[in-house]
Image (spheres, coloured by chain):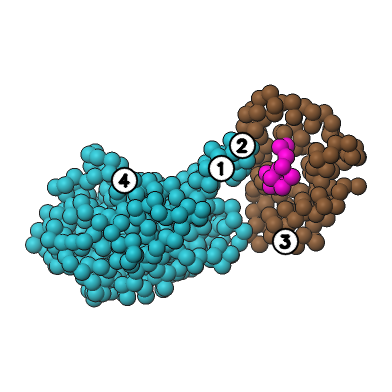
Amino acid sequence: MAVRVVITGLGIVSPIGIGVSAFWKAALAGQSGISAITSFDPFPMDGYRSKVAGQIRDFSPELHIGSQQGDRVDRYAQFALAASREAIADSSLRIDKELPHRVGVIVGAGMGGMVMGEREITQLYETHKPHRVHPNFIPTITLNSASGIVAMASGAKGPNLTISTACSSSAHALGQALQCIRAGQADVVITVGADASITPLVFAGFCSMRALSSKFNDQPERASRPFDRARDGFVMGEGAGALIVESLAHAKKRKAKIYAELSGYAATSEAYHMVIPREDGEEVATTMKLALKAADISPSEVDYINAHATSTNIGDAVETKAIRNLFKNRADKIAISATKSLVGHTLGAAGAIGAIATTLAIQSGHIHPTANYDDPDPDCQLNGISRSPQERKIRAALLNAFGFGSNNAAVVLTRFKA
Amino acid sequence: MADQTIVDKITQALADYLKRDAATIRATHHLRDDLGLDSMAVIELLYKIEETFDLQIPDQDLSAMTTVRSVSAYVEQRLDPAKSSPTDSRKPAPAKSASTAKQKAAPAKPKLAKPKSAPAAKSKKAPAKLKPKRKA
């Protein structure tokens, strides 16, 4: 039998709250973290089709990281540091008392250090002064800057990896943390998803793809509306989520509190299209099926799905179809929620933030609402989606995450039974 | 004697970087041994100084800049070569002429070489040394 792996700590920086308790309270209330982007100083917003995002406004590196480390890294890595600090404290993990090489860090990040990236590129092209490119530019924009700084801050000397598969990055990070522990490489993996790229260039890029919502610019909190008939694209978000993933034996040995079990994971490629999923939903259904099989869980045990549900026309419909195909009659009995309806699409952080919502749902029996599900789209009709919070004893839950590059991940989390 | 405004500006840049009171930084302080700057941090300080004084500091001048005083003396000399005192700065005149000549001729080369050579050479050891200080 495979080594059992559990989740023992959580940390989050999100547009609806910094810290797990603030996040969960806001999530259960269905609070939207989407607000208007007033400007990309010095850019006016006029030229942008979309003008809303899930922005974090009250983050202070001094307050939330509490050291000079925050100054040395980009915004996404600051979020990763803050979230991992909270998760480590929450799990009562004392890395100084552990074998440091048995504690790993795996970070999922889609875009990386784009704040400094864009600033330095712009400056170089405007001034033609290569010597004015900041000495920290390279170590800041490399995608593993967050996993590096989290290790430096925590003393974790085990495997230190970064997974970049766009929007599924941190779902894969969780899956790889599970594999890493099962392969015997580590006892504990600090697993993080982080992104902070609501920046002039990245935001323009998503606008140009026509991927972002633009109909609700004057009602930002209504813009992210997965499964709703009026949805018109996703809303960019930023943030980080961190989960302490640990072998059950290790968690028991140190008498850690256990939130839930991390039971299985599947990674697939649709080998189809850079940004469009296969419309029949077969690949998504297969990914969920493989994850359940890896977890040795039957579809009849699944009580909750934290859907990828980004609020795009095609994506939500395909995911609905896949859920119907896989679960058949049971599809309408499964509670489903879209965390992105609250925080927007946090890209590389989305899997980790969704996993935190899933873990808390399993632990508390409460499922957060899907905001703005006002007029169910017939193409996304599933009885388990609700504008209100749901109460449900969850045996097993699926976390879905699909990324550009034809990339799919599904993670199975289950109620912990000793 | 180094120009006091130059010393003050450099001290302030250091104080901002290290997040400590400028009054606690003395001209005699060694950048690495007393102030805890690792090789990468020295590069960042010089980057800031280049901006503050509108200078370009060539690679070959880096090794002479080890203390607050030697950095100040170097900057002062670069800003006004006539006024320079040769006590602190070891190779002021040749460094300047060599560097300006080079920059004119082939601007890309010395600039590109800079971040490569200095931090890469020492970065393995130096950050470990600084870490406890950053954490505190």
Q: Is mark 3 on a helix, strand or loop?
A: loop
> Residue flagged by tag 2: what amino acid is it?
Lys
> Label 3 near label 2: C-beta < 8 Å?
no
State the extent of the magenta-drawn residues as a range: B45-57
- Chain drawn brown, letter? B
> How far separated are the C-alphas under marks 1 and 2?
8 Å
The residue that appears at 23% across and 59% down in the rendered structure is: A231
Label the magenta part by its dominant secondary structure: helix
Is B52 covered by the magenta stretch? yes
Badge 2: chain ID: A
The answer to whether residue A326 of the structure is visible from this angle is no
Q: What element carries label 2?
A: loop
Dividing the picture into quadrants, the one containing residue A252 is bottom left
> Label 2 near label 4: C-beta < 8 Å?
no
- Please tell me if label 3 and label 1 are on a single chain: no
User: Closer to the N terminus: mark 1 or mark 2?
Assistant: 1
**Is residue A181 found left or right of B15 in the rendered image?**
left
Q: Mark 3 points at which residue?
A: B20
Q: Name the residue under label 2.
A: A129
Badge 4: chain ID: A
> How far separated are the C-alphas under marks 4 and 2?
32 Å
Badge 3: chain ID: B
Q: Mark 4 points at which residue?
A: A209
The residue that appears at 12% across and 54% down in the rendered structure is: A325
